[in-house]
Each structure stands twice: as structure tokens, then as C-alpha cells.
Image (spheres, grey):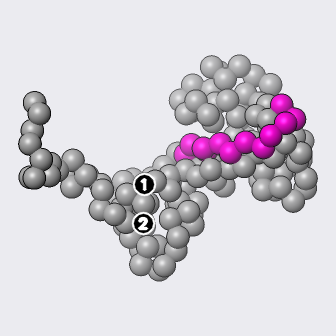
Amino acid sequence: MTDKRSFEGLPDRLAEIASVIGLEGALLIASARGGARLSIPSKVTPDSPIAQIVGMERAQALSLHFTSGHTAQEIEVPLGPTGARAQQVRAIWRLIEEGLSSEEIARRLRIASRTVRRHKTGETGASARRRDSRQSELF
């Protein structure tokens, strides 16, 4: 469709998607699956998640682009626009307490599932960078 350089400000993968199916389609994908993986089948059916998100014509164009008609591919879908960090952290913890999986939380909040897992394990902020006192400093 268009050269991905014309989608400045978008993460590279979203710009690539936009160059194939347009900005609207890329933003639909980011909204539905941003922060998670999405399977792009080599043969798209109306039941394929990608077809449900962007429609058959766009899904087929993405399939051809990413699979060349051969093997299905899983892609990491970057996030689109995100909210304030403090609100995001509160929302993550609220949904963790409700018992949702990391993937469900990531989809609902449009964040990376890795971000949710890091909050669950406590690997965020200063605590993620704290030095283990049992290890010596190298520098």
C-alpha cells in the first residue's frame, strides 16, 4: 500500500502493518491485540482472528506479506497509544486481583503481556534494578 516510513511515530511493526493494510487496519490490530502475539495464517478463513479484526481482504494481504503463502507466522503486535503509567499500574493490579490471566489483562489494557508478568513477579521500577547484596559489583 504505502511506504512504512510515512507512518512516523508508530512502532516499526505497526508501521509495517500499516504499509500493507493502511493506518486504520494497523490501529484496529493494535487495539485488539497490542502487547500480545497474533498468529497470521498462511490461508485466511472468515473465522481467523485476524480476519475478524480487520476483515478478509486486509487479512489476506497481511497473510501474503508475512507468510508468502507458506507457513503461518506469529508476530508481536506493538501497543498503540497508552494511558498514564500510574493508572495503568492500578488497573493491572485490579485485574490481577480479579484473577485474570496475563494475556487477558494485556489485551484488556492494551499493554504487553510481559509488563503484566513483570508486575506479578515484582520486577518493576527500582526493585527490578536493585542489586543482589550476595553478588559483588564488577564496576
> Relative to 61, is 136 on the left or the right?
left
**Which residue matches tag 2?**
92
Residue 73 covered by magenta stretch: yes
Identify which amino acid the numbered label 2 is placed on: Ile
Labels 2, 1: front one: 1
Residue 77 covered by magenta stretch: yes
* Residue 2 shows in this picture: yes
Identify which amino acid the numbered label 1 is placed on: Thr
Quadrant containing the N terminus in the rendered view: top right
Q: Is residue 129 above or below residue 108?
A: above
User: Could you say whether the residue bearing mark 2 is in a helix, strand or loop?
Assistant: helix
> Relative to 38, is 110 on the left or the right?
left
Q: Position of residue 27 (x, y in %)?
A: 66, 44
Magenta span of residues: 68-79
Q: Nearer the viewer, residue 131 or 9?
A: 131
**Which residue matches tag 1?**
115
User: Which of the marked residues, 2 or 1, is nearer the chain's N terminus?
Assistant: 2
Q: Position of residue 119 (x, y in %)?
A: 36, 61
Residue drawn at x 57%, y 25% is 8
> Relative to 116, is 9 on the left or the right?
right
Q: Nearer the viewer, residue 116 or 18?
A: 116
Residue drawn at x 30%, y 56% is 123
| Outermost bottom residue | 98
The image shows a total of numbered marks equal to 2
* Residue 63 shows in this picture: no
- The residue carrying pointer 1 sits among few (fewer than 14), some (14 to 19) or many (20 or more) residues within 10 Å by Cα, namely some
